[in-house]
Image (tube, helix red, strand yellow):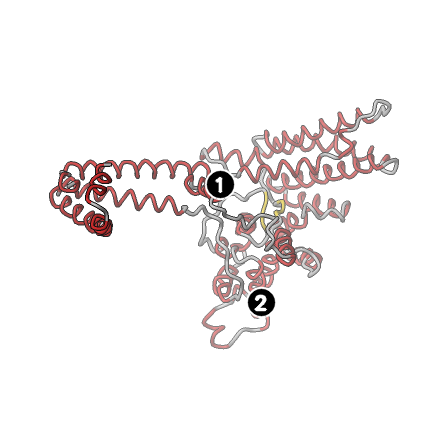
Amino acid sequence: MFLNTLTPKFYVALTGTSSLISGLILIFEWWYFRKYGTSFIEQVSVSHLRPLLGGVDNSSPNNSNTSNGDADSNRQNVSECKVWRNPLNLFRGAEYNRYTWVTGREPLTYYDMNLSAQDHQTFFTCDSDHIRPADASKKPKMNQTFTMNTSYILLAEEEATTIVEAEKLFKQALKVGESCYRRSQQLQHHSSQYEAQHRRDTNVLVYIKRRLAMCSRKLGRTKEAVKMMRDLMKEFPLLSMFNIHENLLESLLELQNYADVQAVLAKYDDISLPKSATICYTAALLKARAVSDKFSPEAASRRGLSTAEMNAVEAIHRAVEFNPHVPKYLLEMKSLILPPEHILKRGDSEAIAYAFFHLQHWKRVEGALNLLHCTWEGTVFHEVSVYPKKELPFFILFTAGLCSFTAMLALLTHQFPELMGVFAKAFLSTLFAPLNFIMEKVESILPSGLWHQLTRI
């Protein structure tokens, strides 16, 4: 009786309302995903419903199924995924901010800038900065001088709008930094606090000199930049955290001083030292330079590879094995963006940082990119990872499908109300057929008076 009393207008209203509700859910889910990067329904389900249903979080450290071997492998994966400071990072104020002024977009992520802040705190501070005893007459003055020096550095990095302004500020910071370094060098053996100050002042001085050398490189004074980098590496040979040799390699390639490039590679391209895309691909470039101008794939297939060509191909394969993302950027199969301030070795970020500065050096060597194009895809390497992208959660796809389905039903019901009413009644009759069968059986078993009372209720 209930189904027979429903009119076509009811079905039009029902499908229209369900379409509207599912559309609102879809819009809210999409907005929440764009803002927070996750599905609201999924988050509520995992956070609130899963514990009520007795779900177990497999990622919990207290999970009894986690073995010692798994824990060791997790620690190993964490160490392999260490984020490194980009040795060729741009200047925040003079270069990154300029991009923001022109495009209105931020070139750096919040995560990247937060890591830079942590780096500055590590390099420019020490434990003794928070201890200022009243009886130490020299220490407040030293701290005051050091604070002024860090102010110069931050102004040069973030507030200077041109490289020329940044260089002037770094030169002022250099005067103060050298004064602090000489003073702490004389006092470093007096106590552990002074020794910590000396390490900090050394880091600051190296940082300033390296950035000054980069300013010279960007302003076209490449030979001066090379000299500053060489002097810095001789003066502080044990400070490898800044990877100054990568700055030196790029500057020497700009000068086309390939003999000196080979000498630097001979020192740093060692099995015991950490590799980088700069090391591997620069070595491949030098090997390719010897044969690339006369290399022909057709001729090589006919006569086979010569010894020099085989060495070049093996060097390219070695480089691609280390970081398989680089060739697509060098061959301009993928668009370049501004390099980040931090990179993940063997990852896409390192490939961007390398290609951004070294693409011109590959183009300068005749035939080098052609040799790379002909050989890099033949490298047998691990599966290439994809730069992390936000995938649409299941519930957004589900609500999108639900919204589309109900919208189609609403449109069909509005256009053909009579026909859709017949289909709806037939569907509901089929759906409720088992229930009607059960009710008939119950009616046949129960006394008629009791059955009428139940149906009235």
Q: Is residue 311 above or below residue 437?
A: below
**Which of the image's four quarters has the C terminus?**
top left
In the orientation shown, which residue stands out farthest toward the top?
A: 134
Query: Considering depth in this image, is 430 or 272 the residue closer to the camera?
Result: 430
Q: Which mark is residue 47?
A: 1
Q: Residues within 10 Å of mark 2 (few under 14, many from 20)?
A: some
Number of callouts in the render? Answer: 2
Q: Residue at x 72, y 27 (%)?
A: 147
In the orientation shown, which residue stands out farthest toward the right?
A: 190
Does residue 256 show up? no
Tell me which amino acid carries mark 2. Answer: Glu
Q: Is there CB contact under 8 Å for labels 2 and 1? A: no
Q: Position of residue 296 (x, y in %)?
A: 48, 68
Mark 2–mark 1 Cα distance, whole angstroms, equals 52 Å
Q: Residues within 10 Å of mark 1 (few under 14, many from 20)?
A: few
Q: Residue at x 19, y 49 (%)?
A: 427
Left or right of residue 364: residue 134: right
Secondary structure, mark 2, is: helix
Query: Considering depth in this image, is 63 or 26 the residue closer to the camera?
Result: 63
Q: Position of residue 414 (x, y in %)?
A: 16, 39
Q: Position of residue 29 (x, y in %)?
A: 38, 38
Secondary structure, mark 1, is: helix
Q: Is residue 188 above or below residue 380?
A: above
Query: Considering depth in this image, is 209 or 261 the residue closer to the camera?
Result: 209
Q: Which mark is residue 319?
A: none
Tell me which amino acid carries mark 1. Answer: Ser
**Which of the image's four quarters has the N terminus?**
top left
Q: Residue at x 59, y 44 (%)?
A: 342
Left or right of residue 109: residue 85: right
> Which residue corresponds to mark 2?
314
